[in-house]
């Protein structure tokens, strides 16, 4: 099936991409991917590198057909229509170059309107890898570049949706790697320490671990303060990269 560039509607490209993803899948690989998830997930069976190459190719085709506006509309409609993990990741990967531009301090067409649309993607997430990909590739670079978006994290942390609460943690990973927003991370951590969902706990542990790698002078005293009420899973992940003696003190 070849792309008909006279058909420039987002719906056309979404149908084209979904059909291509279905044809290009591998059933054996799809079955092997299930071991990474506790809940059943639907996959076509694409390898990440192959999917990334395909998304990059499609991104160029779509931009050639209708520019950045069309590219975003295709990604938005694809994410809303997704039934498999590959469709979710493809939607994110179409826009991934824009996120990487922001991380390098360059201009991007991603702005306030797109951020609001990404917020509406979060409740549609079906697995931890969709959550982390969306947050790490797109939303986190936007928060790093535009601190005004940071306040939304605390709204997500109070959501009944598990992926919103995990997203609140994951979107700050890029920031703590640059020693930013420590006070906000501590505030968020206190809000989520009592969370009983393992997906949220793992997200919080990841965030605190990344802070410890970049800024242990801030992270370790905080862990010592909360260690008696923090879930063991959060502490264990948060301490993974600390020196053995420090890790033992926190986990004692």
Image (spheres, helix red, strand yellow):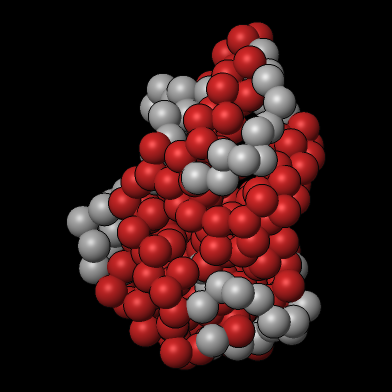
Depicted 220 relative to depicted 18: above or below: below
Depicted 111 relative to depicted 85: above or below: below
Residue 142, given in percent of the width and then of the height, sits at: 56, 76
In the rendered image, the residue lying farthest to the front is 6
Q: Identify which residue is drawn at 74% across, 82% down.
A: 106
In front of the other: 223 or 172: 172
From the image, which quarter does the N terminus lie in? top right
Q: Say which quarter of the image contains residue 107.
A: bottom right
In front of the other: 81 or 234: 81
Q: Identify which residue is drawn at 74% across, 36% down.
A: 54
How many callouts does the rendering have?
A: 0
In the rendered image, the residue lying farthest to the top is 28
Residue 193 visible in this rendered orientation of the protein: no
In the image, taking residue 126 as reference, residue 142 lies left or right, namely: right
In front of the other: 208 or 168: 168
Residue 179 visible in this rendered orientation of the protein: yes
In the image, taking residue 245 as reference, residue 145 lies left or right, namely: left
Residue 197, given in percent of the width and then of the height, sits at: 32, 49
Q: Identify which residue is drawn at 63% across, 15% down.
A: 23
Residue 40, given in percent of the width and then of the height, sits at: 41, 22
Q: Identify which residue is drawn at 61% across, 25% down.
A: 21
Residue 150, given in percent of the width and then of the height, sits at: 44, 83
């Amino acid at each position: 099936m070849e792309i008909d560039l006279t058909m420039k509607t987002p719906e056309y490209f979404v149908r084209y991409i979904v059909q291509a993803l279905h044809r290009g899948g591998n059933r054996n690989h799809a079955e092997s991917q299930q071991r990474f998830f506790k809940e059943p997930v639907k996959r076509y069976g694409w390898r990440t590198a192959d999917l990334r190459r395909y998304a990059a190719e499609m991104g160029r085709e779509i931009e050639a057909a209708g520019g950045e506006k069309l590219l975003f509309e295709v990604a938005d409609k694809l994410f809303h229509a997704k039934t498999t993990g590959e469709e979710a990741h493809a939607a994110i990967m179409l826009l991934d170059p824009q996120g990487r531009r922001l991380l390098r301090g360059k201009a991007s067409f991603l702005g306030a309107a797109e951020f609001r649309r990404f917020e509406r993607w979060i409740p549609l997430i079906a697995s931890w890898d969709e959550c982390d990909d969306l947050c790490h590739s797109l939303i986190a670079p936007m928060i790093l570049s535009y601190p005004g978006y940071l306040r939304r994290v605390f709204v997500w942390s109070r959501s009944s949706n598990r992926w919103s609460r995990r997203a609140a943690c994951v979107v700050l990973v890029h920031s703590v790697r640059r020693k930013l927003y420590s006070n906000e991370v501590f505030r968020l951590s206190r809000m989520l320490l009592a969370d009983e969902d393992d997906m949220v706990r793992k997200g919080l542990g990841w965030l605190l671990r990344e802070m410890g790698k970049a800024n242990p002078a801030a992270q370790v005293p905080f862990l010592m303060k909360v260690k008696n009420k923090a879930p063991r899973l959060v502490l264990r992940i948060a301490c993974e990269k600390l020196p053995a003696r420090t890790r033992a003190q926190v986990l004692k």
